Amino acid sequence: MPIGAISAHGRNEAAHYVMPLLGVGRAFMRVEIVPPGSATARLHSHSAVDEYYLVLSGRALLRMGSHELEVGPGTLIGKPTGPDLTSHLVTSLGESITVLDMEIWPDRELRSKDIVYYPDQHELLWRGEGWRGAQVFSSLSSAEDLFQHYDDGYVRQDDGSWRSANIPGTAPREPD
């Protein structure tokens, strides 16, 4: 493994991140070889991380939002932050691809809070300093429920339900 690089997610993979130790600041880059029938990552978006892909070799299918496009060597894909622009590369065309995956973080220490949205799995990943966890959509409550009961005393359960609670400054929530 080259100096200043770590394997992705601590796994034995054909991908290495080039870290800011090399002087690139908030940019984290890795070269990833993706075999046929696989993908660069789950279809996802970031709330705080800009992401770019440069296809170095091979052909793949780019899924970006609701669109699909065949891409090949020299294709540069830019994906700014935001929940509406999901993307990933799928090697469904019978060949592997080599991709330079670049992430631009708000800070060089990776302490920024970032919500990663995975629409295919109906999951959210909460990452950053003080945040560690994933949540499925079915455990989320509606914004209307939150605002209707904003001043009520209750605690949310892991399954998305709630229980009445004695919280200073709030009246206990009554069953709906």
Image (cartoon, rainbow, N blue to C red):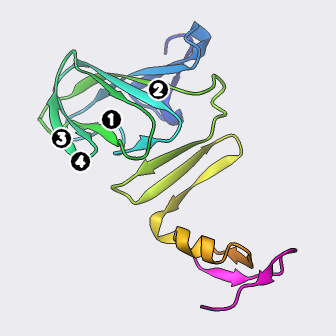
Task: Say which label, 2 or 4, has the lower sequence index.
Answer: 4
Whether residue 127 is visible here, answered yes or no, is yes
Using the numbered discs, state the Cα–Cα distance from disc 4 to disc 3 in whole angstroms. Answer: 7 Å
Q: Name the outermost residue toward the bottom.
A: 175
Lower position in the chain sequence, tag 1 or tag 4: 1
Q: What amino acid type should be assigned to the residue bearing mark 1?
A: Thr
* 1 vs 4, front mark: 4
**Was residue 56 drawn as part of the magenta stretch in this picture?**
no
Binning the other alpha carbons within 10 Å of mark 1 as few (below 14), some (14 to 19) or many (20 upward) gives many
Q: Is residue 73 above or below residue 132?
A: above
Location of mark 1 (residue): 40
Number of marks in picture: 4
- Judge whether 53 appears above or below 94 on screen: above
Q: What is the crowding at mark 2: few (fewer than 14 residues within 10 Å), some, or many (at least 20)? A: some
Pick the front one: 92 or 84: 84
Q: CA distance from mark 1 to mark 2?
A: 13 Å
Real-space Cα separation, disc 1 to disc 4, in angstroms = 17 Å
Q: Which mark is residue 68?
A: 3
Kindly state the secondary structure of the residue where label 3 is placed. Answer: strand
* Residue where numbered disc 4 is placed: 66
Label 4 residue SS: loop
Q: Which residue is mark 2?
A: 103
Q: Which mark lies nearer to you, 2 or 4?
A: 4
Do callouts 1 and 4 mark residues in contact (Cβ within 8 Å)?
no
The residue that appears at 45% across and 36% down in the rendered structure is: 81
Q: Residues within 10 Å of mark 4 (few under 14, many from 20)?
A: few
User: Can you say whether 159 is above or below 132 in the image?
Assistant: below
Q: Earlier in the sequence, mark 1 or mark 3?
A: 1
Mark 4 in CB contact with mark 3 (< 8 angstroms): no
Q: Which residues are magenta?
A: 158-176
Q: CA distance from mark 1 to mark 3?
A: 15 Å
For residue 34, which quarter of the picture?
top left
